[in-house]
Image (cartoon, rainbow, N blue to C red):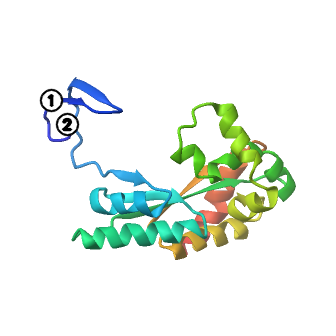
Amino acid sequence: MLDGETVTFEGRYLCARGARLYDRPERRVPVYMSAFGPKAAAIAGRLADGVWTLAHPVKAPRVIAAYRKAAQEAGREPGEIILQGIAAAAETDDLALESSREWKATLRDEPYAEDVADPAQVGQLGEDLSDRKYKMMAMLGPDPAKHVRQIKAMQAMGATAVVVMNVSGADPLGTVRLYGEHVLPQLRS
């Protein structure tokens, strides 16, 4: 379709009949593949323009290594390595934690890797993640230095791009301000 062709496809999970893009992009659109383990990362290394995974300090390096190895074995340069984290600013660390707890499940593999469609089931997955572990994995609170440290840790893991999801229920605009006024300037210097 990106080459201007009309496509009919009958697959196991997707069917397309006479599908066509009428407004094609000026340049080729990169395709990034989500991966939460080495097997999926290897597929991304062989086929995709990049890999997207959670910024888990133990799991992400294994995903990145598998992605790079597969790209090399396929004779390709590795593309984007996108690590995703979550952030919530508020007046205090405790308020940031309390107002973002519902997003704990986004740091678990299951909502992305398994057939979990019910939001209540996703929420239950988050309940299994302790607050202590959540605080270690998320960027929570008003201190920009904490956010900067964690983003730099993501870069050190090999990220070529970092995605930060704003999950602050207490002060979503405050999170945007924190990043615009303090976090991003420190990362750019």
Is 94 placed above or below 45 here?
above
The type of residue carrying mark 2 is Met
The N terminus sits in image quarter = top left
Q: How packed is label 1: few (under 14 Cα within 10 Å), some, or many (20 or more)?
A: some
Is 90 placed above or below 145 here?
above
Calculate the distance from the C-alpha at mark 2 to the C-alpha at mark 1. 6 Å
Assign a secondary structure to mark 2: loop
Q: Which x, y percent locates residue 90?
A: 79, 52
Q: Which x, y percent locates residue 28?
A: 23, 49
Front-lying residue, 143 or 30: 30
Tag count in the figure? 2
Check residue 6 in the rendering and tell me which mark sits there, or answer none.
1
The type of residue carrying mark 1 is Thr
Residue that mark 2 sits on: 1
Quarter of the image holding residue 57? bottom right
In the image as oriented, which residue stretches furthest toward the top? 17
Front-lying residue, 95 or 38: 38
Please name the residue shown 58% across and 73% down the image: 152
The C terminus sits in image quarter = bottom right
Assign a secondary structure to mark 1: loop
Please name the residue shown 79% across and 56% down the image: 130
Q: Which x, y percent locates residue 183?
A: 64, 64
- Examine the rendering and report whether any part of residue 110 can be seen: yes
- Examine the rendering and report whether any part of residue 167 can be seen: no
Q: Horizontally, is 8 left or right of 144 in the view? A: left
Whether label 2 touches label 1, CB < 8 Å: yes
Front-lying residue, 176 or 120: 120
